[in-house]
Amino acid sequence: MKQIIDGKMCTIKDAPVVTLEGRIQRLEDIRAIKECMYHYMRCCDNLDPIGMASCFTQTGKLSWGDIYPNHFEGKDAILAHLKEIMGAAKTQTHYCTNEQIYFAANDSAIVYCCMYSWQTFKAPDVADIYCFGRYEMQVVRDIDGEWRFESFKLIMAGQIGGPRSSEHFDRPWPPAPIR
């Protein structure tokens, strides 16, 4: 992950790894983190709230952005919420790209990526929504060794068919987890 210091782009220093094995593990961790993100997107597209919730730790937090005062905390609450909102969808497609990953520790990372989604709904009078935004996530190596979301936040840059826009300006960098 990069940052700007005195007008220069600089790399944010990750948690150190000093051995070749540690460097290989870091590369494997990056791949596993991306696989968790892609699994979440695939489950979104399949209208699978159980699969989506499986990407969160037991204490995970989900927020649809700073404009909403509350977030969902705990895997059970996240699953209940996802089941509720998935019921209205007919089909959807999600993409994420431009991932940046910063390892705050060897078992914890901050992830930032761009997202695009299209959603269509069962109700014939509800218009499709096209969303462009960012995901800000904290991922951790869970007790079983899998990388999962501890904190997941959607920041909207714009919507076609919805009211949200321009939430991505003046965000903290690197992104801050939900507290």
Image: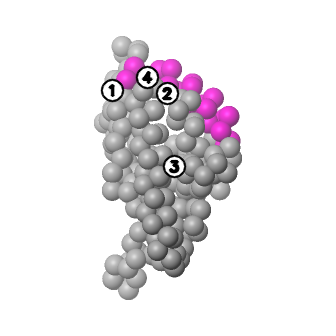
What amino acid does circle 1 point to? Asp
Residue 111 shown in magenta: no
Give the spatial CA distance, label 4 vs label 2. Answer: 11 Å
What amino acid does circle 3 point to? Lys
Q: Which residue is mark 4?
A: 89
- Report the magenta residues as a range: 73-91
Is residue 88 in view from this perspective? yes
- Image quarter for residue 158? top left
Tell me the number on the disc at residue 12: none
Q: How many marks?
A: 4
- Image quarter for residue 41? top left
Which of marks 3 and 4 precedes in the sequence? 4
The residue that appears at 65% across and 39% down in the rendered structure is 75
The residue that appears at 67% across and 51% down in the rendered structure is 143
The residue that appears at 55% across and 56% down in the rendered structure is 138
Which of marks 2 and 4 precedes in the sequence? 2
Count neighbours of disc 3 (C-alpha within 10 A) and say few if under 14, some if 14 to 19, many if 20 or more: many
Q: Which residue is mark 2?
A: 48
What amino acid does circle 4 point to? Ala
Judge depth for marks 3 and 1 and give the one in front. 3
The residue that appears at 57% across and 67% down in the rendered structure is 106
Give the spatial CA distance, label 4 vs label 3. Answer: 20 Å
